[in-house]
Image: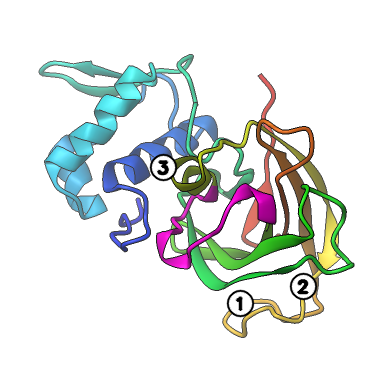
Amino acid sequence: MPTASQSSTALPLYVQISELLIRDIAAGRLIDGERLPPEREMAEELGISIGTLRKALADLTQKGLLERIQGSGNYIRQGGTHESVYAMFRLELLTGGGLPRADILDVQRMVKPDDLPLFGTSAEGTRIRRLRFLNDVMIAVEEIWLDGDAGFVRRELLSDSLYRFYQKHLGFWIVRAEDRVTIGALPDWTPEIFQKTAGTLTGFIERFSWADRPKPVEYSRTWFDTDRAHYVQRLK
């Protein structure tokens, strides 16, 4: 398991652990009836306190994804809710799952350029460029545009989950999204530390996201390394 992040913009540690386990259950890396390692062993491997781990396990128990048997251990249970901060994050490691994390490259408010599709109600938008990771594996570069009428984005308040930021600081929640998955050339602003260079063809996702408004409030494009991650959509 990866070590949880403790940066100032990261999700609370117990939420990170809960999200990691939810994604591993959804991906089939943790199966129904599987017994988790002893709590002390798990906490040590994750680099967190037992108290933090128990908060994460309590969250999974509340969601019906974990059964805690006194004197025996913690057992995975399928059939509960997979409701998650990252419920709409569709990229996974090739082996399945992985905890999403983001490094911010740039945040700017500007007039929407002509190459953007129509979305929102304002002529302005906030552009956010990020590097995306699953666990500690760099898997994508992304550019997110939030409509100017949705509110102002302060870089220092952004967390790994933009949708959580929208809910907490801007007062709205993304309720649905439409993805268009194809291939595309990495943009010219691709950082040199990314394993593929600008112009290289790779996986490409365009997404329109809606809140409680008729028009999409957000548009994003993500270029992901198909040698390290794949796009997964599960139907239930």
Q: With respect to residue 108, does 20 lie above or below? A: above
Residue 19 x %, y %:
41, 39
At label 3, counting other C-alpha atoms closer than 10 Å, the crowd grade (few under 14, some 14-19, many 20 or more) is many
Among all residues in the image, which is located at the extreme left?
71
Return the residue at label 3. 20
Residue 21 x %, y %:
39, 37
* Magenta part of the chain: 147-162
**Foreground residue among 196 and 75:** 196
Q: Could you say whether the residue bearing mark 3 is in a helix, strand or loop?
A: helix
- Residue drawn at (26%, 51%) of the image: 46
Q: Could you say whether the residue bearing mark 1 is in a helix, strand or loop?
A: loop
> In the rendered view, does 154 fall on the left or right side of 106?
left
Return the residue at label 2. 186
What's the amino acid at mark 1? Phe
How far apart marks 3 and 1 lie (CA) works out to 23 Å
What's the amino acid at mark 3? Leu
- Residue drawn at (48%, 63%) of the image: 154
Residue 142 visible (yes or no): no
- Residue drawn at (77%, 43%) of the image: 179
What's the amino acid at mark 2? Leu
Counting every numbered tag in the picture gives 3
Q: Are marks 2 and 1 in contact (CB under 8 Å)?
A: yes
Q: What's the mark number on residue 194? A: 1
How far apart marks 2 and 1 lie (CA) works out to 10 Å
Mark closer to the chain start, 2 or 1: 2
Q: Quadrant of residue 75?
A: top left
Residue 140 in magenta?
no
